[in-house]
Image (cartoon, helix red, strand yellow):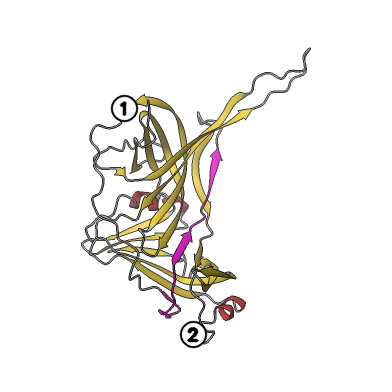
Amino acid sequence: MSLTRRQILLVKEESTYGTDAAPDATNNAILVSNPEIKEVVEMAERDPVKNTLLNPAPLAGQRYATISFQTELILSGSAGVAPRIGDLFEACGFSETVSAGSSVTYEPSSDVSAHKSVTIYLYKDGRLHKLTGARGSFKLTAAVGKVCVIDWSFSGLYTPPADASLPSSVSFEDTIPAVVLDASFTLNSVSSLHLQQIEIDMQNEVQKSDDINAASGIAALGIIARKPVCSINPEMVSVATYDFRSDWLGAVGRAMSFVIGSAAGNKATISCPKFHITDIAYGDREGRIIEEISAELKEDSGDDEISIVCE
């Protein structure tokens, strides 16, 4: 009997695109929730005419795989040391800049030739799925009083699954994730807004590169575009306190930032220089009027629409 709770996910950055990086359970295990894998095989239909009304069976054509899962925002616990989820950020088109003993910064990059890829192993209690050359996108959710979580989605080159036992010894990062409290949220230098949640979705577009020479029919999977969006839900304040509609109608981008955690090695500062409002609607939160605000995140000076600084 195979159990849903007995699953292990390993991730490791590839040195060569599409070449199995062989992640191991000691150094590359990531604590995840709700892993879901989908094997995508595009069937080649056949429709010759003959003496019956039945078509021949279709044939397996291009194939790849997608995987989604959720992680907590777990950092390394040491300032200036990249967390294991750093490999995932890089495979979502982010650069990684390490300042030894101080910080690790992740920012989006439009240099597609520099985009990293990862090998992902998903052990499903007796079976192993492997994705190589995986790239993807993520959505970060920071809700008051809860652990900040990240929903990841990746597409990778397909390998048929094989029977495999769960690793006998698995080591996860032992940093306790910070709870979203005392987040120092500011928008246009206003720090008095009462928010319940912030959500940032990178919305990377991942597409396959067709190749008749490739065994799978696909040379690579790459990020070809991104459209990061953000939503916040502050309690309604006076127009004098913050005039959201003025920003909206004037297409004015405002600086936004917030902080998750405070301890060295377990603190992340998330900054966005241009929060451009695209929609406002009223809502209710336990009898209080709130404003549900949607925005797009835009760059200030190029590839800087968001930065995640782990300190």
Res. 304 visible in picture: no
Give the residues in magenta: 186-210
Q: Secondary structure at mark 2?
A: loop
- Location of residue 139 in the rendering, given as x and y in whole percent from the top left corner: 46, 55
When asked about the image quadrant of residue 27, the answer is top left
Q: CA distance from mark 2 to mark 1?
A: 59 Å
Furthest toward the front, the residue is 287
- Location of residue 178 in the rendering, given as x and y in whole percent from the top left corner: 30, 60
Q: Earlier in the sequence, mark 2 or mark 1?
A: 1
Q: Residue at x 61, y 23 (%)?
A: 59
| Residue occupied by mark 1 | 165
Locate residue 135 relative to residue 44 in the image: left or right.
Answer: left
Between marks 2 and 1 in the image, the one whose residue lies nearer the viewer: 2
When asked about the image quadrant of residue 144, the answer is bottom left
- Location of residue 79 in the rendering, given as x and y in whole percent from the top left corner: 23, 61
- Amino acid type at circle 2 is Thr
Count all numbered tags in the image, as a single digit.
2
Q: Residue at x 59, y 75 (%)?
A: 248
Res. 39 visible in picture: yes
When asked about the image quadrant of residue 53, the answer is top right
- Amino acid type at circle 1 is Ser
Q: Which of these two is toward me, 200 or 290?
A: 290
Q: Which of these two is toward me, 33 or 11?
A: 33
Q: Is residue 197 magenta?
A: yes
Q: Secondary structure at mark 1?
A: loop
Locate residue 157 relative to residue 83 in the image: left or right.
Answer: right
Q: Which mark is residue 241?
A: 2
* Placement of the N terminus among the 4 image quadrants: top left
* Placement of the C terminus among the 4 image quadrants: bottom left
Label 2: few (<14), some (14–19) or many (≥20) C-alpha neighbours in 10 Å: few
Q: Which mark is residue 13?
A: none
